[in-house]
C-alpha cells in the first residue's frame, strides 16, 4: 500500500495480507463506523465563536481569524460507543 499508485493495491490488516483493495475498504461498513469516531486532536475555533477568555489566552486570534483548540480525545472511543448505543436503543 502506498500513495499515488496507478493500480489499486490490496491492503494488510494486522500485518496479514487481504483481498481487500483501498477502495473496497473505504466503501465498507467497518470504515464507515470507524470514521464516525470523533478523535481529531484539534478543532479550529473561528473568532466569532471564541469566548472572551479564549481571546485573552490566544492573542493572535485577530491575525489568524481564530485559534486551534487542543482537544482531549482520551475517551473518544467510549463516547462513540455511548452515542451509537443511544442511536440504536432510542
Image (cartoon, grey):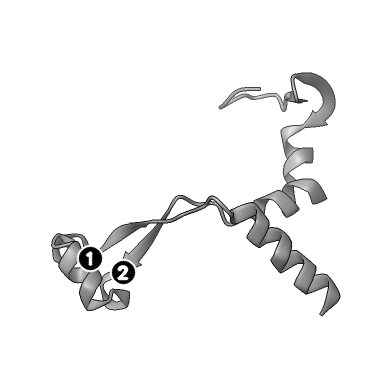
Residue occupying the point 54% across, 50% down: 74
Q: Are marks 2 and 1 in contact (CB under 8 Å)?
A: yes
Query: Which residue is under mark 2?
Result: 46
Image location (x, y in percent) of residue 53: 22, 73
Q: Which circle marks residue 65 in the picture?
A: 1
Q: Is residue 70 left or right of residue 81?
A: left
Q: Quadrant of residue 23?
A: top right
Above or below, comparing residue 14 to residue 70 in the picture: above
Q: Badge 2: few (under 14), some or many (20 or more) residues near its Cα, within 10 Å?
A: some
Instruction: Judge by depth and name the residue closer to the eye, 74 or 18.
Output: 74
Report crowding for label 1: few under 14, some 14 to 19, many 20 or more residues within 10 A (C-alpha).
few
Position of the N terminus by quadrant: top right
What x and y, as percent, mark residue 38?
Answer: 58, 57
- Identify which residue is drawn at 31% across, 69% down: 46
Q: Quadrant of residue 70?
A: bottom left
First in residue order: circle 2 vs circle 1:
2
In the image, residue 81 above or below residue 90? above
Side (left or right) of 42 relative to 67: right
Give the secondary structure at mark 1.
loop
* Residue occupying image coordinates x 79% and y 47%: 30
Relative horizontal placement of residue 45, taking residue 9 as reference (left or right): left
Q: Secondary structure at mark 2?
A: strand
On the rendered image, what quadrant is the C terminus found in? Answer: bottom right
Q: Which mark is residue 4?
A: none
Q: Does residue 25 appear in this view?
A: yes
Closer to the camera in the image, 31 or 54: 54
Give how far across and how far down residue 65 sits, in percent: 23, 65
Identity of the residue drawn at 79% across and 67% down: 85
Placement of 1 over or under 61, stated as above or below = above
Q: In the current view of this chain or complex, which residue is farthest to the bottom?
A: 90
Q: Nearer the viewer, residue 4 or 16?
A: 16
Cα distance in 3D space between marks 2 and 1: 6 Å
Amino acid at each position: 500500500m502506498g500513495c499515488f499508485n496507478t493500480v489499486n493495491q490490496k491492503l494488510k490488516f494486522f500485518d496479514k495480507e487481504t483481498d481487500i483493495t483501498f477502495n473496497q475498504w473505504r466503501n465498507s461498513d467497518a470504515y464507515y463506523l470507524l470514521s464516525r469516531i470523533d478523535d481529531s486532536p484539534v478543532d479550529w475555533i473561528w473568532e466569532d465563536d471564541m469566548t472572551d477568555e479564549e481571546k485573552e489566552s490566544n492573542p493572535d486570534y485577530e491575525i489568524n481569524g481564530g485559534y486551534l483548540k487542543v482537544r482531549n480525545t482520551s475517551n473518544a472511543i467510549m463516547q462513540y460507543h455511548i452515542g451509537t448505543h443511544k442511536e440504536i436503543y432510542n
